[in-house]
Amino acid sequence: MKRTSSFSILAMLAAALLPLAAFSQVAPDHKATSAEGADTYKYDAYLGVGYTSLNMINGSRYGEIGAELAVTRYWGKHLGLVADGATYVHPVSSPEVVGLTQTPTVDTVLFGPVFEAKFFGKTSIFVRGLLGGEHVGGFNQTPNISLAGGAGAGMDYKLSNRLLLRAAGDDIASSFTLINPQTGYSPNRTRSSRATFGIVYKF
């Protein structure tokens, strides 16, 4: 009799604890899925304020401010391909171009691979290689388009699952004629530094 009562009590206790055990197994899976879902975005779009020096123009001693727009497609958590476009139209200070009074503008369209990794806490870092073209306008430069390319790096700070702050910099090389007007492609190679700060949206 005592043995039967003991078995009955154990059976009731097991039945009472069974839903609790099942819930404890389901809950962590749900959280893991949510955490993974936050990192499954395949694209990000960036819009920010940018700066470039003007070493591709002979005698230039100032830089320009403009805007930079970039879209990145990711494959996995670390590797991506970026398309980057920028335009710079506002001089930082009065132009100091030898023998000229024009204020040039600079436009770039660049593409390349990106490698990104978590750094610390809410921050991640990335490096990228870029190749494309650069155009100088508002200035007596012939030709005014050049092959351009370089490398850069940056850091993202996570505000939410979709929004991040970004600060980045690049070193972009190009080849323009430094003696104007001069027809034909230039053997000169110059490097101009770029910097940008803005916001990223993941989707």
Image (spheres, rainbow, N blue to C red):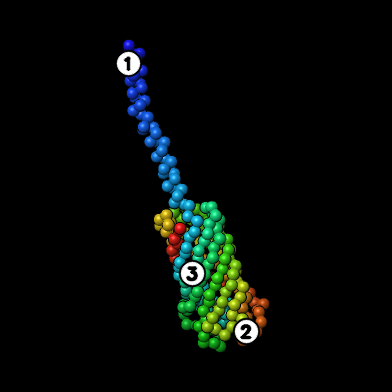
Q: Gap in Å between the C-alphas at discs 2 and 3? A: 29 Å
Does dot 3 land on a helix, a strand or a loop? strand
Q: Earlier in the sequence, mark 1 or mark 2?
A: 1
Amino acid carrying mark 1 in the image = Ser
Find disc 2 in the rendering and name its residue.
179
Res 200 → quadrant: bottom left
Does dot 1 land on a helix, a strand or a loop? helix
Q: Position of residue 8 (x, y in %)?
A: 34, 19
Amino acid carrying mark 3 in the image = Glu
Q: Gap in Å between the C-alphas at discs 1 and 2? A: 103 Å
Answer above or below: position of 176 versus 155.
below
Does dot 2 land on a helix, a strand or a loop? loop
Asked whether the beta carbons under mark 2 and mark 3 sit within 8 Å of each other, the answer is: no
Residue 68's mark? 3
- Closer to viewer: mark 1 or mark 2: 1
Quadrant in the picture for the C terminus: bottom left
Say whether residue 159 is left or right of residue 115.
Answer: left
Answer above or below: position of 38 versus 152.
above
Badge 1 density bin: few <14, some 14–19, many ≥20, Cα 10 Å? few
Quadrant in the picture for the N terminus: top left
Find disc 1 in the rendering and name its residue.
5
Res 179 → quadrant: bottom right
